[in-house]
Image: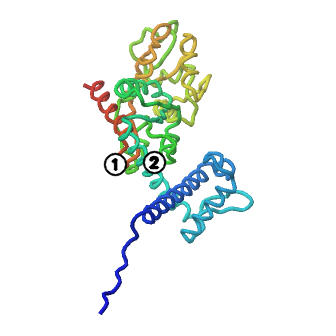
Amino acid sequence: MQAPTVCRPAAGPRASLSTKRSTESHYRVIDKLEHLLALARERHFGRAADACGVSQPTLSFGVKQLEAALGTQLVQRGSRFISLTPEGERTLDWARRIVGDARAMRQEIKTLKNGLTGQLRLAAVPPAIAMTAALTTPLRARHPDIRFVISSRTSAEVFDLIDDLEIDAGITYLDQAPPGRFMTVPLYEEHYQLVIGRSSSLARRKTVTWSEAAQVPLCLMTPDTQNRQVIDRLLKAAGGTAEPTLESNSMTALVAHVRTGQWASIMAAKLVQSLELIGKICAIPIVEPTAASSIGLVVPAREPMTRLTAALVTEARRWATQINS
């Protein structure tokens, strides 16, 4: 009797071609997930297409292909984008994970081949923006091929940007970190000082109370920032309210005004120290109560962590150990 024919996987060029097609297919799926991420972020088909570097019909077709593959509608659309469906929102969660892992894998393979290199994207809340240099400078000394992109953002924006894979890490208020989604490295406690001109009647004081600080015309961050919200709560608890003579979402603008010695503000002690503001102004600790907010590094809670992110985390832990010892 003739032995039955055994089917075996094709070998040689055909097998290589099949593997290549399978890999290309997976990359095409990731591209479609990238399109969904951009659409959820931009909430506009044209802007999402521009962000992905494709035409609008290409992006729209890619999303429709993704819907067909999953067998469900992901996007509510009329003549324009309306919203994601509940299924679309859930798919978005998976898309963030899958695309994030794919990007991390590519970066990991590149660093294994070429050493620690690439772009590290950071965002920091305005009071902590000057502190980024404490991490980036020694990190670049150890790994000179790393490039950095740093932006100033609100605390809420920092977490959204990490979720949307727009940045790799952030420096922000740790009490705002949603549990489970982020790994945190505490850096320092943010204590507050009244920064005021030397001609002020308060200039000779060793401390001032929050109630006294509420009586001073202040220039402060805008109300959408976590820094301002913390200050408003502390002033309110002391029986006062903030009535700023100047508001800005730029810490640089506040610092420029304070440097003149003609404006007062409430700033984090670390910021005052790092910018060397002492000169024309006095920085007086604010007490009753002595308040502090925990500032730290936040990165995605993803394992394995990319080597670039891991290097930043190591640097953050090293700096925190030195500053708090």
Mark 1 vs mark 2: give the one in front: 2
231 relative position to 58: left or right? left
At x 50%, y 14%, the residue is 196
Q: Quadrant of residue 262?
A: top right
At x 44%, y 13%, the residue is 276
Q: Position of residue 282 (x, y in %)?
A: 46, 12
Residue 294's disc number = none
Asked if the residue at tag 2 contacts the one at tag 1, i.e. Cβ–Cβ closer than 8 Å, the answer is no
At x 47%, y 13%, the residue is 277
Q: Report the front residue among 273 and 210.
A: 273
Secondary structure category for the residue under label 1: loop
Q: Residue furthest right?
A: 79
Residue 288 shows in the view:
no
Disc 1 target residue: 304
Q: How many marks?
A: 2
In the image, residue 97 above or below residue 162: below
At x 58%, y 21%, the residue is 253
For badge 2, the amino acid type reads Arg
Q: Position of residue 323 (x, y in %)?
A: 30, 24
Work out whether mark 1 precedes mark 2 in sequence or the reverse, and give the earlier one: 2
For badge 1, the amino acid type reads Pro
Q: Position of residue 119 (x, y in %)?
A: 46, 35
Disc 2 target residue: 103
Secondary structure category for the residue under label 2: helix
Mark 2: give few (<14), some (14-19) or many (20+) Cα within 10 Å.
few
Q: Report the front residue among 208 and 103.
A: 103
